[in-house]
């Protein structure tokens, strides 16, 4: 098998014994990118010479032989996470030409672990979207069917991992942007608990919801990457100071007696029946492994999309105020400073970002603040309490990640509300601040389906344990698109 098709743990064995070098692995991935990325369009930026130079430095340092967790492993990074010396555009014209002067916390951790930082992956502009169609630089394609979208907003990261154009990738998840594209592309995507992974150096979309997490080819790799990126960081005031366990230690542990909750609100009319069948079959497979299946209720689920689109847009309207033509990226000169702000933002932001800024500004404005923003925060608390009650009855919750498989490019881009509904099963987890993973659980009409396993705050070990147990009885995660 070619090196680019291997997982982190498979490569690690070869790298640690010196059977292969970081340069060979990196070259193999670069060759793969050269062969398929003109079709997938997952990368926005790549510097092959720089990637090889990083690999050579790792080879020279002997990092692999010294057992560094990611020594010589090429990793792709979503264009919203800062990597010093690389562009960071958030797929927006307003940041065209902007080069990061510093590393995000997670980037620093990756470097210290010996990863090769390959390049920047495509996304919806400022992570707003579910298809990558909101990118200012063109849409990424789903490697399983190039006429379809890879999901979003971290669609580029999901697509390059699924197409073996990176061994793993990082993305960000504010309302589902890791799990939904992982589901649609047939890879593993993990959203950590809010506060587990530092947001320092992640360009903010909705600060109370954003988390960085891994895209990988299997659950073991997700645990390996989480080990590297999790942990307290004083530069992020919401980073939680608590000891981080070795997330690989739980893999392979028996799930006998573990209770898996099925929320009745997540199996709804209107969802794809075949997707539902895949998820139910996955739950049955877990029951066969000895898990106990219990029904739970998350009664405020129906308000989640509305609450999310008030809170996320409110926070976005404040966060995006910094893009004013003075401090970063694009500047369109006007007659005076106000005119310059207006022209820069008018030309720099795409239509979805403008829509969100307007919605958020409205929700925060005097007279509407209590009716919309404050009320949304109250319902958010109710959603969080739903999970608290549910997790008294079960250890993890199983649901579909997305109500449908990948849709065709253009199918929903004219209807924002339809697009917003793509996240119906992923959003509540962010509102509650919990963790969740999506793992491949079958195919419908040749397209991947994802099983979502949700855990309580800081219950990543349970989520990974159940996800790995599922992998042990199925081979869906080993399927690769033929492109
Ligand atoms: N699709 C959702 C949105 O458009 C979630 C995006 C995300 O998680 N970054 O806001």
Image: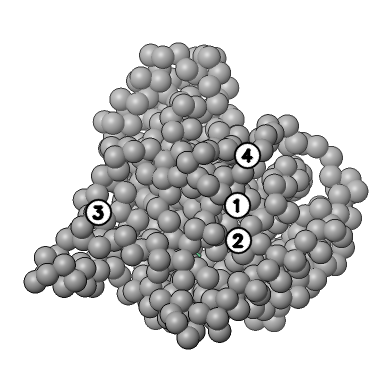
Q: Secondary structure at mark 3?
A: loop
The residue carrying mark 4 is 241
The residue carrying mark 2 is 430
CA separation in Å, label 4 and label 2: 20 Å
Q: Is residue 48 visible in the rendered structure shown here?
A: yes
Closer to the camera in the image, 197 or 2 = 197
For residue 367, above or below residue 410: below
Q: Residue at 76% x, 68% y: name it.
A: 386
Q: Is residue 283 visible in the rendered structure shown here?
A: no
Display coloring: one colour
x and y, in percent, of residue 425 in the image? 64, 68
Disc 1: CA contacts within 10 A as few (<14), some (14-19) or many (>=20):
many
Instruction: Please state which of the two labelled residues, at mark 1 or mark 4, is closer to the viewer.
Output: 4
Instruction: Please state which of the two labelled residues, at mark 3 or mark 4, is closer to the viewer.
Output: 4
x and y, in percent, of residue 15 in the image? 51, 20
The tag earlier along the polypeptide, 3 or 4, is 4
CA separation in Å, label 1 and label 4: 12 Å
Looking at the image, the residue that sits furthest to the front is 366
Q: Secondary structure at mark 2?
A: helix
Q: Residue at 90% x, 48% y: name it.
A: 257
Closer to the camera in the image, 444 or 29 = 29
Asked if the residues shown at circle 2 and circle 1 are in contact, with their CB atoms under 8 angstroms apart, the answer is: yes
Asked if the residues shown at circle 3 and circle 2 are in contact, with their CB atoms under 8 angstroms apart, the answer is: no
Q: Which mark is residue 293?
A: none
Q: Which mark is residue 328?
A: 3
Instruction: Please state which of the two labelled residues, at mark 4 or mark 2, is closer to the viewer.
Output: 4
Q: Which mark is residue 194?
A: 1
Ligand 1 is within 8 Å of the C-beta of the residue at disc 2 = yes
CA separation in Å, label 3 and label 4: 32 Å
């Amino acid at each position: 098998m070619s090196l680019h098709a291997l997982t982190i743990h498979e490569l690690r064995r070869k790298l640690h014994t010196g059977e292969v070098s970081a340069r060979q692995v990196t070259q193999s991935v670069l060759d793969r990118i050269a062969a398929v990325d003109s079709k997938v369009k997952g990368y926005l930026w790549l510097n092959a010479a720089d990637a090889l130079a990083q690999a050579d430095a790792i080879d020279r340092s002997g990092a692999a032989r010294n057992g560094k967790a990611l020594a010589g492993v090429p990793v792709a990074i979503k264009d919203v996470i800062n990597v010093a010396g690389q562009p960071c555009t958030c797929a927006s014209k307003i940041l065209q030409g902007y080069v990061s002067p510093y590393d995000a916390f997670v980037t620093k951790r990756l470097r210290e672990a010996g990863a090769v930082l390959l390049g920047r992956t495509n996304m919806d502009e400022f992570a707003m979207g579910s298809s990558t169609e909101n990118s200012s630089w063109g849409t990424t394609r789903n490697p399983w069917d190039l006429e379809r979208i890879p999901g979003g907003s971290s669609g580029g990261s999901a697509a390059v991992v699924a197409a073996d154009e990176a061994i793993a990738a990082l993305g960000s998840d504010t309302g589902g942007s890791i799990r939904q594209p992982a589901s649609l592309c047939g890879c593993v995507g993990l959203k950590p608990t809010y506060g587990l992974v530092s947001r320092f150096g992640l360009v903010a979309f909705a600060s109370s919801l954003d988390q960085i997490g891994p895209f990988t080819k299997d659950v073991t790799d997700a645990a390996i990457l989480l080990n590297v990126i999790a942990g307290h960081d004083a530069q992020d005031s919401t980073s939680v100071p608590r000891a981080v366990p070795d997330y690989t230690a739980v893999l392979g542990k028996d799930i006998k007696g573990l209770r898996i909750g099925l929320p009745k609100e997540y199996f709804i009319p209107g969802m794809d029946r075949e997707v539902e069948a895949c998820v139910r079959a996955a739950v049955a497979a877990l029951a066969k492994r000895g898990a106990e299946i219990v029904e739970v209720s998350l009664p405020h689920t129906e308000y989640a999309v509305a609450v999310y689109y008030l809170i996320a847009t409110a926070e976005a309207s404040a966060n995006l105020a910094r893009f004013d033509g003075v401090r970063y990226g694009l500047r369109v000169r006007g007659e005076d400073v106000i005119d310059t702000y207006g022209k820069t933002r008018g030309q720099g932001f795409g239509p979805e970002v403008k829509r969100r800024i307007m919605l958020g500004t409205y929700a925060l404005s005097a007279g509407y603040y209590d009716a919309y923003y404050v009320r949304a925060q109250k319902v958010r608390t109710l959603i969080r309490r739903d999970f608290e009650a549910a997790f008294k009855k079960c250890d993890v919750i199983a649901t579909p990640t997305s109500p449908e498989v990948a849709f065709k490019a253009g199918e929903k881009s004219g209807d924002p509300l339809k697009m917003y509904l793509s996240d119906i099963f992923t959003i509540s987890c962010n509102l509650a601040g919990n963790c969740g993973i999506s793992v491949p659980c079958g195919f419908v009409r040749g397209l991947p389906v994802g099983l979502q396993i949700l855990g309580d705050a800081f219950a990543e070990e349970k989520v990974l344990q159940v996800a790995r147990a599922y992998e042990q009885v199925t081979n869906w995660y080993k399927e690769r698109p033929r492109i």
